[in-house]
Amino acid sequence: MVEEPRMASPRFITATWWLYVIIVAGVYNGNLIAFLTRPAMDVPIKSIRDLVERPDVMVSTLEGSYLHDSLRKAQDRDFKALWARMEGDPNALVDTYLEGLQRVLGDRKRAYLGDQSMYDALPVLKDSRSLGVDQCRFARPNKHFQVNYFAFPFQKGSPYTGRFSKQYVHDRSLN
């Protein structure tokens, strides 16, 4: 038989230990239940090839964007097929990201091709929740099909160069 502590400090340590054990067990059980009850999201389109092979899915993109120009001038067979499909659709080109996302929400047979930065900003887009745009209602493939590089020029000796570089490296390390 284990004897209970009589002094205040051992009682405090014992109570703290059991409180810790109860919290850890509760968090573990909560995460386990959340993991087991979460439905697996099946992404039907995982690549540009999958999108080309699904003629029933219409494609939208931002008018005047780099992606729009790339599709229009593409030499790749898959991109040419997507552009041909977009030319026949009057709703293929949108003026804003939110308009494109709303079209996807309104039409289950539509895919929106956009920049990675748009998807990263989705949770914080201004008024996105009031417009019915929620990141949880979208799926995106993990594979990138087009990589873009950006350059930000600063004058020589600018005080912003170092600060910008540090922030950029920090942001890149989070991805």
Image (tube, grey):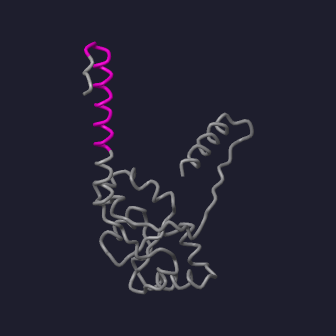
Question: Over which residues does the magenta segment extend?
Answer: 6-27
Q: Residue at x 51, y 63 (%)?
A: 115
Q: Is 56 in front, or is 67?
A: 56
Q: Is residue 148 left or right of residue 47?
A: right
Residue 107 placement (x, y as % from top left) = 31, 75
Q: Residue at x 51, y 82 (%)?
A: 82
**Residue extending furthest toward the right:** 156
Image height of 16 relative to 60, above or below:
above
Residue 136 placement (x, y as % from top left) = 34, 60
Image height of 152 relative to 57, above or below:
above
Is residue 25 within the magenta segment?
Answer: yes
Q: Residue at x 59, y 73 (%)?
A: 70
> What main secondary structure does the magenta stretch of the protein show?
helix
Q: Residue at x 39, y 77 (%)?
A: 91
Q: Is residue 131 left or right of residue 157?
A: left
- The part of the image, by quadrant, that contains residue 106 is bottom left
Image height of 85 relative to 44, above or below:
below
Q: Is 28 in front, or is 162?
A: 28
Image height of 143 relative to 133, above or below:
below
Give the quadrant of the N terminus. Answer: top left
Residue 36 placement (x, y as % from top left) = 30, 59
Is residue 107 within the magenta segment?
Answer: no
Q: Is residue 41 left or right of residue 53?
A: left
Residue 172 placement (x, y as % from top left) = 58, 49
Q: Is residue 69 left or right of residue 89?
A: right
Q: Is 80 in front, or is 5?
A: 5
